[in-house]
Amino acid sequence: MKLDLVHEYPAVQRAAAGARARDTLRLGDLLAAQGVITAAQLQVALAEQKRSGRRLGRILIEDGIATEQSIASALAQQLRLPFVDLTLDLIDLPTAKLLTETQARRYRALPISQLSGVVRLAVADPTDFQSLDDVERLIGREIKPVVVTETRLSAALDRLHVKNDEILGLAKELELEMRAEFTNAAPAPASANAQVDEAPVAKLLASLFEDALRGRASDIHVEPQERKLQIRFRVDGALMLHTEAESRIAPAVVQRLKLMAGLDIAERRLPQDGRFNAKVRGQSVDIRISTMPTQYGESAVLRLLSQNSQFLALDKLGMPAGVASRVREFVQQAQGMLLVTGPTGSGKTTTLYGALATINSPQNKIITVEDPVEYRLPGINQVQVNEKIGLSFATVLRSTLRQDPDIVLVGEMRDRETVDTGLRAAMTGHMVLSTLHTNDAASTPTRLLDMGAPRYLVATSLRLVLAQRLVRAVCTECAQPHAPTPQESALLNSVVPGAGFSGLRHGMGCANCNGSGYAGRLGVYELLEMTPEVVTALASEDTVAYMSAARKQIGELSLARHVCDLALAGKTTPREAMRLIGTVGEIGENAEPAETADVDPQSKPLAP
């Protein structure tokens, strides 16, 4: 094995060399010597390491003292090894398969290319000489290590080891079993599905859930078509085709899902909703299922909610400074209602939990009423709604108020009784946080009135309305400068007059973003404060006067302004801004909304 050090180390001498390297190479001293961190920062990090037992590198990264890339680069420089900014286009797929997924994850190593019989091996810890020896024996070839970051290595392994082939194989296995049972070419009748061995179905779904979690999918769509079963993932808000299989297996797959959720498998004419929990890659995942009868059979949509997900603190959500400071000030008060509005999947619950984390202390009694409980927070009493046994939002909320809470979080204002109880609680000394489905912040008070809430109760209890959306973020791996179209220029100028366009970017499409040009999503926010002027306008029963007062109060803290600021900063694209602004109906006078209608990429397979 050749290391890019001063000498070549035969395998017999490598263990001794590794021991010497570990004795002489101290990460903290190395980073301080190279100027990555200061001596004072090193002492603070070492004290934290002694207190918590965490690895020094992890402490430096999590505390924002150093980046993964700077640490890996410094380590590579000290060992005279190449540092590689690992992306999928640098990986030769046949070479990567020299190690199985289990082996690659165990040794934290990935073969990425080979030349003249020498394999370049991407590793996050080049001082683990024992693992290097083991990998060399496994692949039977000389290896040449290159240093990569842990995050890039894990991401590459996740993308390379998707289970498309395994899923297709299991689908074929299931289809063959069904063909053996039913010799005619027509799709199997639902009544016969019980005769099908469930093992292939269970394995297929397990692989499907694992792929979805690896690919950061929020939803799985199982859709029977005339001649095929189509399975799509929603990633970063866009649907992508993942698998196509024989339509014959669709009833068996949907029936298995219904059994897991405890739904009525005999009822195929009506929509049904349910939930179940699954263990995927060691994570507990809450899965909500909705079934719908369609022309070619029952379709199912699965929403994935990982119980191991970490919520973001309020200052990490990407809110504009003016919005974040006002929300933070409000939640420190004793009473009133804060409503977070937006469509399903726009991050409302994440925002509410960020607010809760700000005020979570032994001095505050906090109770949440949710459907389902998406995050676990210590010190908080969390109740999950169960409509089947009569445990509704309104029922739980009434009981909650008898538990002497200081802060109450209601997952959603679904009906008049819940709205009325929540508003009265906010008026009588409680802090109430909840969500509502409205188009923007200004229309939220009128929506409460439409639901039957008394006008005086809305005016006296509602304090803040935070509207939010999610837009796709530009992929940092393939981002390029972007020249705006005339329509995009008109939109940006109408919302941010005189803005320069030098910071605009768009993604060209790469393996990291699956060719879409986008990777991840960003929050977009709008804040309405119920000032005396807004309350007076609302009480006047003049809708035009109220909307005018509300828009004036929102000012620059609007969805349109925030998304345009993100586009001008190169974090999202003008096209995404046009899509969002067209949705909330705030297109400027000179913009052309017709261009916003078709922005989602066409469905296509997830690239490995």
Image (spheres, rainbow, N blue to C red):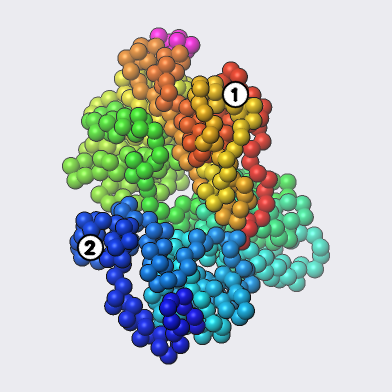
Q: Is residue 53 left or right of residue 132?
A: left
Q: Quadrant of residue 247?
A: bottom right
Picture coordinates of residue 515, whole percent (x, y): 63, 51
| Residues at discs 2 and 1 in contact (Cβ within 8 Å) | no
Query: For the point 63% across and 58% down, which residue is it?
Result: 607
For the residue carrying disc 2, how many other residues have a C-alpha within 10 Å: few (<14), some (14-19), or many (20+)?
some
In the image, is residue 247 above or below residue 320?
Answer: below
Q: Which residue is mark 1?
A: 490
Estimate the spatial distance between the alpha carbons at disc 2 and disc 1, rounded to whole Å.
54 Å
Picture coordinates of residue 465, whole percent (x, y): 39, 27
Picture coordinates of residue 239, whole percent (x, y): 62, 47
Taking the magenta stretch, the answer to whether it contains residue 371 is no
- Residue 580's tag is none
Q: Which residue is mark 2?
A: 46
Q: Residue furthest right?
A: 184
Mark closest to the chain's N terminus, 2 or 1? 2
Range covered by the magenta-colored residues = 539-546
Q: Quadrant of residue 24?
A: bottom left
Query: For the point 21% across and 41% down, which residue is it?
Result: 364
Picture coordinates of residue 38, whole percent (x, y): 26, 56
Badge 1 marks a residue whose secondary structure is: helix
Taking the magenta stretch, the answer to whether it contains residue 540 is yes
565 or 126: nearer the eye?
126
| Amino acid at circle 2 | Leu
